[in-house]
Amino acid sequence: MSAEAAGGIRIRNIAKRYGSTVALDGIDLDIVPGEVLGIAGPNGAGKSTLIRIIAGEERPDSGSLAFDGQPWFPSVDWHQVAVVHQEPQLFPNLTVAENVLVGREGTRTRRPRLGIEDAGVMQALGIGLVKDRLLEDCTLATQQRTEIARAVARDARVFLFDEPNSALTDEESNELFREMHKLAGEGRIVLLVTHRLGDLVEHAARVAVIRDGKVRKVIDKPELTEEAIAEQLVVGTGGEQTATPKPSAETGREIFRVSGWSHGSEFSGVDFSAAHGEIVALMGVEGSGARELLRSFAGLEHCTGSIVIDGIAGPEVFGHTAYVPATRQLSLYSNLSVGENLIARLGVPQIAGPMLRLKKRRMREAAEESVRRFLVKTRTLAQGIRSLSGGNQQKVAIAQALTVGPRLVLLEEPTRGVDIQSKREIYRLLREFAAAGNAVVMFCTEVLEIFEAADRVIVVSDGRLSAPLTVRDFPHIEALAAAITRLERHTRLRLVEDVAA
Amino acid sequence: MTADSSTADQDRQGLSAAGSATFDIALRMGGLFVAIILVAIVIFILKPSSFNIDVGISVLRAMSSVAIMSLGLLLVIVVGEIDLSFGAMYGLGANALAVMWILWGIPIYAALPLAIAVGAVVGLFNGLLVTGLRIPSFIVTLGSYNLLYGVSLWITKTSTFNPVYPPPGAEIPESELDFFTGLTASFGAHPISLEVVWMVVIAAVIGWLLHRSLFGFRLTAIGGNPAAARLARLPVTRYKILAFVLCSVLAAIAGVLDFSFIQTTQPNIGLSYTFPVFAAVIIGGASLAGGKGTMIGTMAGALLLAELQQGLALLSPGPHVQQLFLGFVTIGAVALDLALTHVRKKRAA
């Protein structure tokens, strides 16, 4: 392999497990200086664990890393590695220049000073003029440049770009990628991790697809297309449409509609509807506006336009929705028990009577019913919520939202970080909920989830909605993945044409 | 564990607010009561002569105003906020009553509810600034502490009031004076002040609110995870404001009751209660992070402090000892808490 001749990083048989979960299951990867290596993979595939290991934030359980032929331990040699995050991990209360200097030793009586080289680095990155500004007053793009400058100044050899441009404008991300190529051109090792397949194809020389803790395939230049990556992301995942047959969207009565739905910055003039018994997926990368769109249906974002649920319009419609956030930190109460979490959204008259007196028996009955209906595996209702497995915690989070009897339930990545068994059960419960005459809209980032759970998928790109795809029309997941990728590019390109026109 | 015994467990425990922490809380409560008894024994050994029922009653009287304020502060702490102004509110409650009644001649029957209403207004002020303008409650109530003390100085013109010896020109009808002193009159063979009865009634009401009503359940949820509560559309703002209002109202009530018992008021009364009241709530097992705290624990915390204070006054080893004890007990209680949590986590793992 060229890696041995030219040096670079050699990763051999790296494994890492957390408790009973296998995050990495023998990763082999060669990273050559001077080229940009792309990394793609679904959530929970082990991508972020690999990044953390290379960045020295975690130690592998077994396997070896070598740098230029020498055994390498990133957790000791961390200063060699720089990670450019989506949200820069810097000190907002210091100036740009101070951020570049932080961590460097001064002498006992003097603070570290900005050297000529540091100034040169900042100049080259285009942040020389703002070096005395407080970081919190700078744009995200400047903050990321500061992060790069900080690493260049300490002469880091490895740069990990982790979803770097999800919150940047097109112009800003083009400039960021220019800097990225410049770093590669200087002979540094550059990794680009992103969900945006278009960026991978455009900027990476090779793309490694990681799934189930292994490198599935490294796609080289001639074959490197968005469709090829999309296929590798899902191929062989089996993915069955657990969604039981249901009346098609045409015959189902419409239950939810927004029109001319506009947000301050993320989207405008959106028309969207969902029918009785339907599960609709909104797919989009971070920054596409899909997440904000979903939240806006629950009244959590300030929007204008008309919204109707089951013939009801006006602000009270939001009372018929329930929203389940992506992270359980935003839906569960760690100081409450499993039972209390299940009924936390209930009030008068379900669990309290006159004078707000709690009906203890009704509380227990309601919690017991939820445990039965949602198959929550818990020993007692009184044990702490944190004692449950991740999958069961997620079931509690969803059950909690459904107890209030919404007509429309809105979920963000409903099975993120959840085991396969719980995943199945959650999909089945959502299906049951929909079949009872309600609608489900979920924000997804994984094709597998859409294939297994949704009836319809709509791709959101820069606040634009694509035409819908009917999931049942696709016999296998690879076809769906390819179609979604085409649709995503199409929506993106249509935007460019519109701007040009 | 068989299925049967686990249902039995559930029947016994229900959904108890403590959840899996039931055992910890039992230990914690047990520890607190053991401490209360130990202190009593130590005092008995050192000074047997002072150990009688009247001293016990005086401890209850001494704890009552601290306990009433602690219960108010408990609500604010459970919802995840801080109130520093209740001590100054205690003073303003008493001083506002004194000025309205003695100086302005408003009948006690109107002046008393008005003084308590001042508490409600102050609580509303604190709550609105915290929820509306998103100013941290530490800062809002640090400000209102000074504001309230300033108002007390202002309306009293820095003077002391005693309804039995009203200033020249003012006249207090006998019946009103009787009513006022009657609020905390002593009764029974071993005279016990009505103030103790008020404390017990208030403790029962707050205990019910916190542990038996939807208000308390949601207060606990909001304190545990305000972001989740907001996303679930629980009435976060309203409940936070209500907690501040109840805290200030209870402080005003405590001030008025103590005024009735002591019968004099000065502009600066109550300020020195700020830290003992915090200590009582913390010793009682509430968490400053919010979402955790019980009525019975808070009462036990207030009792332990009053016992130490009275006991050390009897033994008179010097004023420094009481301060040292207050410090040790506060830190010790929280250290014990952390140790217990650690033990439980280890056992669970």
Image (cartoon, rainbow, N blue to C red):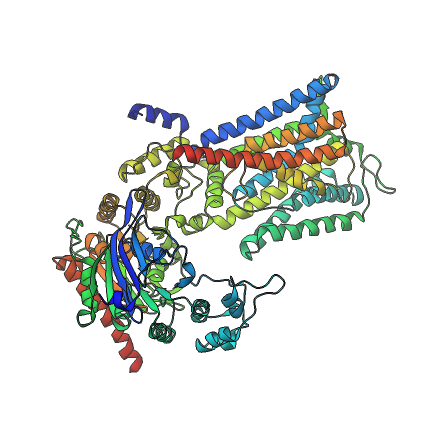
Counting from the top left corner in percent of width and height, residue B231 is at 41, 51
**Residue A467 visible here:** no
Q: Quadrant of the C terminus of chain A?
A: bottom left
Where in the figure is residue B8, as x and y percent of width and height? Answer: 35, 24
Left or right placement of residue A63 versus residue A152 in this view: left
Residue that appears at 54% across and 53% down: B131
Q: Nearer the viewer, residue A223 or A226?
A: A223
Residue B120 located left or right of residue A355: right
Image point (36%, 60%), residue name: A296
Up/down of A439 relative to B264, above or below = below
Quadrant (top left, top right, bottom left, bottom right) of the N terminus of chain A: bottom left
Task: Note whether residue B282 is visible.
Answer: yes
Identify which residue is drawn at 74% across, 43% down. Answer: B95
Image location of residue A399, percent across then percent down: 32, 43
Q: Quadrant of residue A461?
A: bottom left
* Residue B246, placed above or below residue A173: above
Residue positioned 32% across, 42% down in the render: A19
Above-or-below relation of B133 to B72: below
Extreme-right residue of the structure: B168
Q: Position of residue B338 (x, y in %)?
A: 51, 37
Residue A124 placement: quadrant? bottom left
